[in-house]
């Protein structure tokens, strides 16, 4: 028998994209955005939807479903090629490109080993208790209450010595190992126990087990400076990795590292990854992407000191590209034309590129990204960057019209 068709989609494909731009522009949560959409006819016109005042939207999950659908279908490079073609007639200086990298941080607390282990203990203990109740067996004995009191006492202290931290970490590891062992025993001794756990609970147990193995090995090595491969810093966001930035204010950031290129003030994503990478090796890829987006060869390129390696210098020299890299060797007494261009490229890169990062983070929701999944977080970054681009283009058009009048 043929399945019945569902109701017609509420938003058109264009309306869904417009809704995502509207969310990043306003910075509203889904419930608040739904309220504004119900009462603001301008928002409805922008999203190509008509909402009856007598029958307004009541379930904000509808908007979340739209965002999830967009996240699953997002193809960054293909979408950026479409945007570049649309914006190209309004852009100038297409032969000049700037590049830099930044980290768009995820909304999460600062992770420490005791915090991460205790979070894993709470979740795994709850799963063990739920499984015991469903199997109608006694809950395995653990020292959960004792360790909970010790953890609370530790958290109340303003300062923690290394001895106190190591002592608590040992107790947390022992308790977490005990809980995971008892949970596996319950699953092994009772047929069909795995079916009693939800997909989310199975995923949490798998992530917590990986965290336990990482933390156990790190604790036994007793080397605080040891680099842990693919280190998990959040159980709810296991895809997030620590990104070492080496800045004075924040030496480590937690989120997606993004290498952007900028042409005429508009930014485009060259590479986005939740794992750390060396942006200094990305300059040839940036130049190729620039040519692909705009169809012209870059004659000038600006980047900070991390891009000024020998390989990049040779690459640009062979292709006749003027860069902002500091000239090697002794400084010349006479300033040549190339020196003036170099200084101007460095100045513009420092103001425009760094300024664009600040604008995206402060005004378009990219300072602390409040997303629950990896795909949604990438979606927010993509639309946050390009919402800033759209607003900049609109302001240019308004200024040009005002000047012409």
Image (spheres, helix red, strand yellow):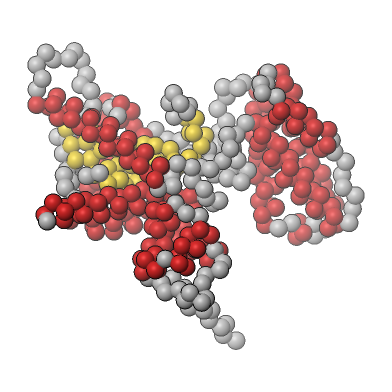
Residue 278 shown left or right of residue 342 in the figure: right
| Residue 296 image offset from top left, x and y in percent | 17, 48
Residue 344 falls in image quadrant: top left
Residue at 74%, 56% in the rendered image: 197
Please determine whether, in this image, residue 138 is positioned above or below residue 302: below
Toward the right, the furthest residue is 138
Image quadrant for the C terminus?
A: bottom left
- Residue 165: image quadrant is top right
Labels in figure, total: 0
Question: In the displayed structure, does residue 158 sit left or right of residue 331?
Answer: right
Q: Nearer the viewer, residue 344 or 32?
A: 32
Q: 35 or 303, which lies in front?
A: 35
Q: Quick one: quadrant of the N terminus?
A: bottom right
Residue at image coords 80%, 53%: 130
**Image position of 121 with respect to 42: above or below:** above
x and y percent of residue 257 in the render?
A: 43, 39
Residue 272: percent from left, percent from top: 41, 44
Q: Residue at x 11, y 13 (%)?
A: 333
Looking at the image, which is closer to me, 211 or 355?
Answer: 355
Q: Is residue 369 above or below residue 318?
A: below
Q: Is residue 253 visible?
A: yes
In which image quadrant can residue 19 be found?
bottom left
Residue situated in front as seen by the camera: 185 or 255: 255
Q: Position of residue 81 (x, y in %)?
A: 29, 55
């Amino acid at each position: 028998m043929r399945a019945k068709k569902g109701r017609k989609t509420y938003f058109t494909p264009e309306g869904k994209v417009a809704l995502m731009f509207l969310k990043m522009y306003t910075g509203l949560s889904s419930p608040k955005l739904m309220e504004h959409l119900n009462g603001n006819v301008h928002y409805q016109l922008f999203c190509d939807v008509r909402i009856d005042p007598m029958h307004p939207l009541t379930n904000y999950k509808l908007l979340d479903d739209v965002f999830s659908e967009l996240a699953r279908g997002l193809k960054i490079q293909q979408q950026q090629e479409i945007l570049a073609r649309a914006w190209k007639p309004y852009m100038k200086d297409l032969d000049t490109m700037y590049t830099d990298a930044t980290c768009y941080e995820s909304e999460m607390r600062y992770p420490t080993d005791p915090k991460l282990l205790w979070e894993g203990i709470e979740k795994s203990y709850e799963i063990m208790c739920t499984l015991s109740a469903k199997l109608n067996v006694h809950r395995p004995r653990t020292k959960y209450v004792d360790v909970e009191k010790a953890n609370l006492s530790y958290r109340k202290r303003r300062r923690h010595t290394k001895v106190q931290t190591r002592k608590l970490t040992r107790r947390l590891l022992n308790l977490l190992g005990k809980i995971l062992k008892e949970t596996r025993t319950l699953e092994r001794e009772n047929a069909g126990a795995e079916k009693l756990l939800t997909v989310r609970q199975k995923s949490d147990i798998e992530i917590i087990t990986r965290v336990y193995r990482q933390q156990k090995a790190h604790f036994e090595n007793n080397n605080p400076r040891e680099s842990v491969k693919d280190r998990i810093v959040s159980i709810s966001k296991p895809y997030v990795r620590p990104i070492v930035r080496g800045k004075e204010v924040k030496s480590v950031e937690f989120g997606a590292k993004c290498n952007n290129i900028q042409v005429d003030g508009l930014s485009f994503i060259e590479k986005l990854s939740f794992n750390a990478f060396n942006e200094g090796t990305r300059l040839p890829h940036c130049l190729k992407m620039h040519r692909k987006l705009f169809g012209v060869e870059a004659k000038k390129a600006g980047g900070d000191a991390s891009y000024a390696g020998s390989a990049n210098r040779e690459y640009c020299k062979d292709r006749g590209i003027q860069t902002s890299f500091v000239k090697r060797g002794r400084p010349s007494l006479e300033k040549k034309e190339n020196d003036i261009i170099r200084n101007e490229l460095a100045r513009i890169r420092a103001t425009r590129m760094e300024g664009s990062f600040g604008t995206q983070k402060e005004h378009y929701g990219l300072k602390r990204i409040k997303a629950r999944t990896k795909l949604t977080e990438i979606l927010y970054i993509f639309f946050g960057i390009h919402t800033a681009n759209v607003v900049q283009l609109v302001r240019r058009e308004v200024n040009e019209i005002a000047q012409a009048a």
